[in-house]
Amino acid sequence: MAPALLGLLLGLLALGPALGPGFVLRYDMVFVPDPPLVLPGQGFPRAVPSDLVVALLSAVLPEQAVQKALLLGIFVLAASGAAALVPSGRLGPRLAAAAFYAWNAYLAQRLLLGQWALLLGVAGLPWAVRAVVLGGRLRLAAALLPAAVGGFQAMLVSALTVLATAVALPGGVAAPGRGGRAAGGPPSPRPLPGAMARARRAGEAALVLGVLSLPWLVPALLSGATTDPAGVDAFAARADGPLGVVGSLLGLGGIWNAHAVVPGQESWWSAGVRLVLAGVAVWGFVRLRGDGPPISAAGVPASGPGEPPAGSPPSGSAGRGAPPYRAGLAGAAVAGLGVACLGAFAPGVLKALVGWWPGFGPLRDGQLHLAPFALLQALGLASAVRLLASRAAAVVAVAVPVLVLPTFALGAFGRLEAAGYPEEWRRVQAIVNADPAPGALLSLPWGAHRAFAWNGGRVVLDPATKLFARRVVWNDELLVGLPGGGRIRVAAEDPLAVRVAAVLRGDPERRASALAGLGVRYVLEHSSENVFQDGVTVFRGRELNLLRLDYPS
């Protein structure tokens, strides 16, 4: 209970003004009033099934409350999960792990990038590791639900850690009906050999991961979306402080978007302390041990010194030896750190992989895969506190994450803040959603992101992409600035967006009819735009114009 409460307090402190009336809109974080229940359209399903889950929750709860509950839930789930993995009954080490995992540069940067769906999976990661250790497909499926809601990024990060833990877990798996018979009882199971046990655990984990990934995996395979290898350079890890790319990554930073860096994070003090903290955490993780009698998954004391009974999955909650997840989590952390370094130091390898198969596209954003390293550091810090056996050390360990990144508080000093949609957005939404005729809606200007004055000028993905109960065509091409100047253009993934872009570059007099031929019924444009001379004006407001293209398809 205490770690969950600590997570809630940290969430309240971090979000601050974001918990006020309205929606938090920043980069990928787009919540809208009355979100429609729609299936994924064309293009890569990045918001599947998270958008559908939000729409379902919003049918019974206020939309603003849904967003705030999800954001606070990330902190509570992360803190309580990290504490549950600490192999100690002492409160100090558990709170140290909880505080670090719920307040670090990785979580802060991803939140400032608006990737709340990814962070759901990251928050549930320690629970998934625990489920692998305890065993059981249903237990693992329940632990992976936050990642399943988050979608492809959350599931990929979870898959790396879950599979590594399953493969590296010590001990055998009981084979039903094999072994001897206890006095007066049924035959006792005999564990399978180590290699077979690992293969079985990994297979079961892969099955659960695969089933929970179907909501985004199936539309992704059917989408026809492409992946531009230029994204490797655009999304590669970058230095966000004076210690270079590697130093930034070791401190759980290094995100590609400079606007997602916490204020002051680039200072020598912050970067240096985070690097020292990473060193202490890795040292503590190497020496990670339990401080109580080992127990089996059922909570029964083990029969042997430091080992659970034969056939029983080991528990990560206590034990004098190293916790059974240690080797797997270490492997996942090293692999994630390697992926993060790959895009920065060997981009040619990733470009070749992406060019060969678009499915390697998620590896472009290498810093994303630091999640298991963040969990490793949280547990290592808890271990260091246990080894020091000092209340003062525990208090410092709980406070130091906030002290190192104090400007993450209060919505990163206003970078996360709630805002209300102007009424004309709701009116346009009502008009379009009330029309039973088929056809897509084209959102203009032809760019992925917007910066509205009513949202404090914060950059956000076009809200029109989530506002309507019909296909929305938007420009998913991305321009990413480079530290030394210049920009990288990452090509659009949606085939329909590519065809629409060609029409917009063509003859203005034939533009409306050509778009209608592509299945576009509505055009939503900013009031300052005058792209279409044809079409029926359905709504005209201070910010938005809505036109209907009455052409036969």
Image (tube, rainbow, N blue to C red):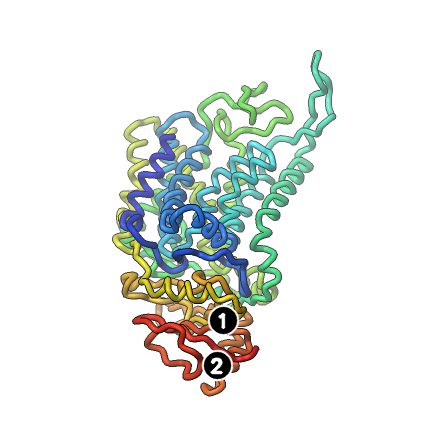
The answer to whether residue 367 is left or right of residue 202 is: left
Q: Position of residue 341 (x, y in %)?
A: 47, 56
Badge 1 amino acid: Ala
Mark 1 nearby-residue class (10 Å; few <14, some 14–19, many ≥20):
some
Find disc 2 in the rendering and name its residue. 512
Q: What residue type is labelled 2?
A: Ala
Look at 47% across and 46% down and name the residue there: 121
Determine the secondary structure under disc 2.
Answer: helix
Q: Which residue is drawn at 74% across and 26% down?
A: 177
Q: 164 left or right of 372?
A: right
Query: Closest to the observer: 194 or 8?
Result: 8
State the image coordinates of residue 130 (x, y, percent, origin top left).
51, 35
Q: Residue 491 carries which label?
A: 1
Image height of 440 relative to 152, above or below: below
Task: Kindly identify the residue that appears in the image at 34 percent across and 36 percent down.
Answer: 6
| Badge 2 density bin: few <14, some 14–19, many ≥20, Cα 10 Å | many
